[in-house]
Amino acid sequence: MEKALWYLLTATRGGANRARIIDALSDRPMNANELADELDVGYKTIRHHMEQLEDHDVVESGDEEYAKLYFLTDRFDKYRDTFEEIVEKMDE
């Protein structure tokens, strides 16, 4: 998971938005529309990032197809300190 977080947040152009998504989901589960509104990012951009985050087991979605909620995974929670460390280095 550490390597996945480094890759998702620093090795690609969307890293800053992915970090913002993770921060937003730390407060409460949200669907893609809510995330787009909250972060002032296009819906399609959010969907792209959510696919990447799901593929790397950072987020998971509920069973609903329409307005499905996204949650941070239990696995991610074990690596939250790594996430915080990466974000701190991104801000330097």
Image (spheres, rainbow, N blue to C red):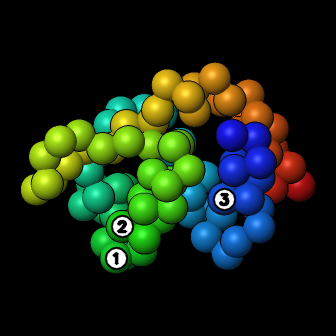
Under circle 3, the secondary element is helix
Image spot of residue 32 (x, y percent) = 29, 58
Q: Given contact means CB atoms under 8 Å apart, are the residues at marks 2 and 3 in contact?
A: no
Under circle 1, the secondary element is helix
Name the residue at 77% across, 67% down.
11
Residue 8, labelled with which disc? 3
Residue 47, labelled with which disc? 2
Relative to 79, residue 41 above or below: below
How dense is the environment of label 1, judged by Cα within 10 Å: few (below 14), some, or many (20 and up)?
few
Q: Is residue 76 left or right of residue 68?
A: right
Locate the N terminus by quadrant. Answer: top right
Amino acid type, mark 2: Arg
Name the residue at 57% across, 33% down.
76
Image spot of residue 88 (x, y percent) = 81, 44
Q: Is residue 8 left or right of residue 24?
A: right
Amino acid type, mark 1: Lys
Real-space CA distance between mark 2 and mark 1, rounded to the nearest whole angstrom = 5 Å
Quadrant of res 71: top left
